[in-house]
Amino acid sequence: MKYIGLSCGFHDAGLTVVDDKGEILFAGHSERYSKKKHDANLCEDIIAEAVKNAAGDKFELHYYEKPWLKAIRQFRAGQPLGPFSVKQIVGPELYEKFGDHPIITHVHHKTHAAAGFQTSPYDEATIVVIDAIGELDCISIWHAHYDKNGYAKYKKLWSQKYPNSIGMFYSAMTQRVGLRPMDEEYILMGMAAYGKPIHANRMASNFLDDIFDVEFKQNLHIGLEEKNFLDKADDMDIAASAQLLCETLIEKVMHKAFRLGKSKNLVYGGGVALNCLANRLLGKYFNNIWIMPNPGDAGNSLGAAALGYGKKVIWRDAFLGTDIKGPYPVDKVIKELKENKMVGVASGRAEFGPRALGNRSLLADPRGPEIKDKVNEIKRRQKFRPFAPVILEEHVDNYFDMPSGFSNSRYMQVISRCRHPDLFPAIVHADSTSRVQTVAKDGSGIRQLLERWYDETGCPMLLNTSLNIRGEPMVNDRADADRFEKLYDLKVIS
C-alpha cells in the first residue's frame, strides 16, 4: 500500500507519496510544474510524477482538510460555499488521472500536526499550529505520542477559531503596506528591521479583545476598514509594529502550550512557523524544537499522507522533488565562484519547501561589499531585503549567535545575530542578523561544496538564495535552468 497526500484548492498545492515502510518517495509543489507562483491547483505533470512514484501497488488518496467542515465556516461567515467533494476541488478530469482509489479527508490542523510530528525525531511532543485559517481553527495546541504499536496518537488541548487569526492579522498588515497578502509576508518581516514598532500598542488596542487568548475585535480576513489609525503611518513602522505584535501573540500561544503540554519537545507548524524572526523566541519555553521545512499548506500533503500511513515517517532531508540526475558539480561551481563570484546550481532532487537549500540555489561569495547589489540586480528585488548564509554546521557558533533552543538551523528556520557583520556584508540584514542555514556532515552535494570552498578560501559559508525567475517559483528541471541562464546571463550548473 502507498499513500498519496493532496493539498490543493486554496493556495500552494502539493502532492506527497509515502510507502508502507514510511519512506517519502516524492514530495513536490504544483507551482514548480505549472510555473504559476503559489498555484492553488494541481496540474497534470505533478499528478503524473506522483502516480509514477506510487506505481506497482495499491494506494489511497488522503486530502489535507474536510471540505464540508470548511463549508460550515464559509456559511457562518456569509461567504460563498466552496465545493463539497475533493473530486470537484481537483477537477473531474485531473482527478481521473489518479485512477479509482479510496479517498480519505482529514482535519486541516491535524494534518499540519502530523506533517510536523511524524517527521520529527521525537516520540512525544507538544504541537503548536498557527496559520491563517484551517476549516474553523486558526490556532491549535496538541499533545502527540506513539502507542505500543507505533501509531501516532493526537489529542487537541486548545484551539482558537475563525476569525481570531495571527496569520490573517499579518496578511492584513502585508496588504496595508502595498504587498501581496498570502505571498509577500516574508518581505514585511524583512521591512521590520528598518522601522520602529511605535504602533504596536495601538494595534493591540484597536484589533484585540483579549491578547492572552488571541481574540480579535474585527474579522481581518476581509481586510482593514477603509479608514483607520494606520492610514498615514510609515510602511516600515507598520512592519516593525506588526512584527512585534505578531511575536507577542505567538509568545502567548507558546506560553499556553508550555502550560498545557506534557512535553518539552515542541513541534511547530502552519504558515506562521515560517516567520524565522519570531522563531528565535521559541527556546524560552521548549528545550527541543522541530519545524518541518515545509510547514505551510503545501507541506500538508505530507501530513495527509503521514496520517494515512499512521506511523513515524522516515525523514532524511528536504530533497524530495524532481530529480536532475548526476553528481553534484562541485568542481565546476568552485571554478565559477572564483572567477565570477556567483553561480546558479540545479542538481539532484528539488527542495520540498519554500527555501532553496543548495539544489536549486543561486550561490555567491558572501565577503564582497558589492555582491549583495549584484545578486539583487539579478533577482530584481528590493535592495533592503537580506540574503541568507549557508555554513558548515561545525563553524556556526564562530560566526553566529544561535538563539536558545536551536543548535543548528538546517532549513533556514531561525535568524541569529552575525558576530562579524563587517566581514560578510552580503548576508547580514540592517539589524546585523542572518537567516542561517547550517549543513551537517551528511555527505550532501552542498556539504561537499562548502568543504571544498572552506579548504580553498578559509571561508566556511556562501550566500544562498533561491534560483528563480522573477514572478515564478524556483527552478524545477533543466529546461527551467536553461531559461534562467539565458534570461539573466548567469551560468547555471547541473
Image: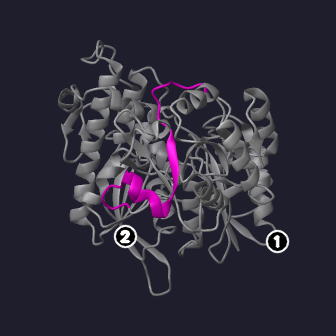
Residue farthest bottom in this picture:
148
Whether residue 24 appears in this view of the structure is: yes
Residue type at mark 1?
A: Gly
Magenta stretch in the rendered image: 380-406
- Comparing 20 with 236, the one in front is 236
Residue found 27% across the figure and 72% down from its top? 262
* x and y, in percent, of residue 421 in the image: 39, 40
Identify residue for label 1.
56
Q: Residue 125: which disc?
A: 2
Q: Residue at x 53, y 41 (%)?
A: 366
Q: Is residue 359 left or right of residue 382?
A: right
Residue 70 image position (x, y, % from top left) = 48, 45
**Which residue does the image show at 52% across and 36% down from the upper left?**
81
| 2 or 1: tag closer to the N-terminus | 1
> Mark 2 against mark 1, which lies toward the viewer?
2
Name the quadrant of the N terminus: bottom right
Give SS at disc 2. strand
